Amino acid sequence: MLVGLLTAVAASICYGTGSVLQAVGSRKSARREAAAAGPATGQVTVHGGPSLSSTAQAAMTWEFIVGTVLDFVGFGLGALAARLLPLFLSQTVISANLVITAVLSVKLLGIRLTRAEWTSIAVVCSALVLLASAAGSEGSGHTPITTHWWLLTISLLLMAGGTFLVRMLGARAAILAGLLSGLGFGALGVGVRVLNGIDPFALGTLFTDPALYAIPVAGIGGMYLHTVALQIGSVNGATAALVVGETVLPGMIGVWWLGDASRPGFAWPAVTGFVLAVTGAVAVAWFGAPQNAGEDVPAPTDTPTQNPALAQNRASWHRGPAR
């Protein structure tokens, strides 16, 4: 249990640090786009959302690259935590990277946290202590192979269909992109947990398990959708939706199908800690004050093809975690 908790906390630190660095990279890319905006920039789709080239440019800044490396490290640590802890505990601890993001943003992004944010952070930390003290051993994770095929199918539908919907909705899709990315990361955690061929190690079993292929589909798709949410603009609500998608559904799946449980007699403390941790994490995202980035990213006013809503949203970046 202790090793799993330390692993989950380390994953949360990696994700939180990577979030801030990716945010810095996204802001730098947005400044460049605003400065070079013109009729043929192709930075937005006809629906007002960011184009693939715009998303790629945001991902090519050195800050975003370092943040992405930390994400991969966090992914490895989070995968290990998902094998060592009940999903309702591992996913919740990892989602607490919002706290790391908030604290680091004070230094790196010049953000001043409000009293509501500090209160929410205190709630998250207290709830995680309660949840960790109440959590029991993780379940076996053994499920029929048909369940693994369902996981792969659902991951493909979520990521492909979600990408299509987000591009169609454009600048209105921040919350949807956040929810879908959270569901993707939740599916990733479930896939890691049920993966066959790990213990005992069997290469043939591993590579024939559909869950192995659901992991990169859900992870890469979730990362792309959250990058889009960061570009679109106000992602406080999107981040709150991400936390819910990443924690609630996987936690329920872990309890109902994978055998996760609390310590005997600690069911209510476990439920209370889980609810408070998720609520506090959502509050950290929701109360996050918007950046007054208008000075950093001036919205172009003389470009008829530039979507004004997207330009305004890019000029007002809100903090949120990336994966």
Image: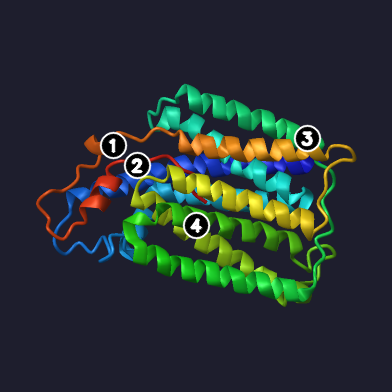
> Does any portion of residue 39 appear in the rendered image?
yes
Q: Which mark is residue 269?
A: 3
Coordinates of residue 177 in the picture (x, y in percent): 45, 57
| Label 2, residues with CA under 10 Å away: few <14, some 14-19, many ≥20 | many
- Please determine whether, in this image, residue 145 is positioned above or below residue 229: below
Q: Secondary structure at mark 3?
A: helix
Name which of mark 2 and mark 4 comes first in the sequence.
4
- Please determine whether, in this image, residue 18 is positioned above or below residue 255: above
Name which of mark 2 and mark 1 comes first in the sequence.
1
| Label 3, residues with CA under 10 Å away: few <14, some 14-19, many ≥20 | some
| Label 1, residues with CA under 10 Å away: few <14, some 14-19, many ≥20 | some
- Seen at 20% across and 42% down, the residue is 298
- Please determine whether, in this image, residue 209 is positioned above or below residue 60: below
Q: Secondary structure at mark 2?
A: loop
- What is the three-letter code of the residue carrying label 3? Pro
Q: Horizontally, is 258 left or right of 239 in the view?
A: right
- Seen at 70% across and 46% down, the residue is 90
Give the distance between the C-alpha atoms of the residues marked 4 and 3, in whole angstroms. Answer: 33 Å
